[in-house]
Amino acid sequence: MTQENQPGPQWDDRPPRQQRSLFWPVLLIGVGIALLLSQLGVIAAISWGLLLRFWPVLLIVAGLDPLLGRRAPILGTLLGILVLALVLGLLALGPAAGWLNLQRSDWDLPSINVLTEVRHSRLEEPIDGARDARVTLDLGSFRTEVDATSDDDLLLEAEIDHLGQMRFDVSGKATRTILLDEVSTGINWSSVTGDHRWEIGLSPEVPMELTIDAGSGPVELDLERLNLTEFALDGGSGPIAASLPFGDYEVSADLGSGPTSVDLPEGSDVVMRLETGSGTVDLRVGDAADLNLTAVDLGSGSFTVRIPEDSGVRLRVRDDGSGAVSVPSEMDKVKGSANSKEGTWETDRFDRADHQVIIDVYDMGSGSLRVQFD
């Protein structure tokens, strides 16, 4: 074939030029319009705080654009217009509709800003006739220490370092209800350094239902002198060390990824419900103490129970999961096959023991369980 007779380039066989989604251009134009309207006073500046509550929606639509916009550009464009309309609607109508009101005394929310400065507050609540109390502590990311009060007239005292504003709600008279937590509508982009902490004191004189929601910081709970009627602990990602008080009360613990150690004092009588996560858990039972422990789910972390040698112990595993079960030689398997991790183990003369530790495991999960005598 001669040069003249060779076919020319087949331009019609080239792939069509790919059209691009207009999602991001539309969204950027919309942000500019919103800023302009805010500067002109059409949109109140305070209404920008509403966006913080809806920021996950932006992540969702940003993820939808690569999925839909590349296949059908018109869908990406429509998605951008929809997000723009949603943002403008929230900014314009949010304050009037009451969706965001930063002046509400019950929330005491700060204005929207970037949090960079650590502040300090001292909070107090006198006993003032309180016969019992329900106290909820929602902890943050700083180190927290909870102990008994240094002043006999105070039901609660606290020295708090914080980035956001503190919420300290108190209600009731004879039965006092207290909620303490940090409320923040800002974003912490700072690198906080220094020995910042929460130091909280609770009255040992007033019977108390105590609920603690741990955050990401280390938590030390020295509760030995308190008069607890109920105790609930919700663990976070930080380490927790708890010393519980003497007495007859109930404990509920839902632990997270942080390591947790709990000391049960001598002579106490506790009913405990436990769920663990991925963190290790170490429970030490004091001399002459009675414990009825129901482990609903042991998660993926290891769980160790340390028991005095003279205690009567019964361990019952209802669902072994994939975790390992380790018991001391002093405990015999009285129910279940020898090769199964399910079954019941008991010490000799368990029913006649002066003090008993009963461990009932409903779901082993993938974590290990170890019972040992100290």
Image (cartoon, rainbow, N blue to C red):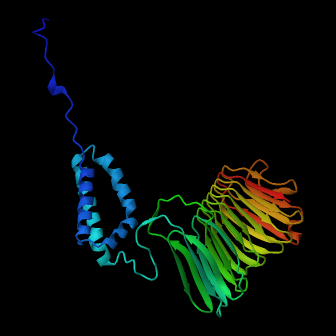
Q: Is residue 205 left or right of residue 186?
A: right
Report the quarter where the C terminus lies.
bottom right
The residue drawn where x is 33% and y is 51% is 64
- For residue 279, which quarter of the picture? bottom right
Name the residue at the top extreme: 2
The residue drawn where x is 44% and y is 75% is 109
Q: Report the front residue among 227 and 95.
A: 95
Q: Residue 79 at what x, y percent from top left? A: 26, 55
Q: Residue 31 at what x, y percent from top left? A: 27, 59
The residue drawn where x is 53% and y is 72% is 182
Location of residue 123 with respect to 327 vertically, above or below: below
> Does residue 335 appear anywhere in the picture?
no
Name the residue at the bottom extreme: 129
Q: Report the front residue among 41 and 147.
A: 41
The residue drawn where x is 59% and y is 81% is 123
Q: Is residue 182 left or right of residue 334?
A: left
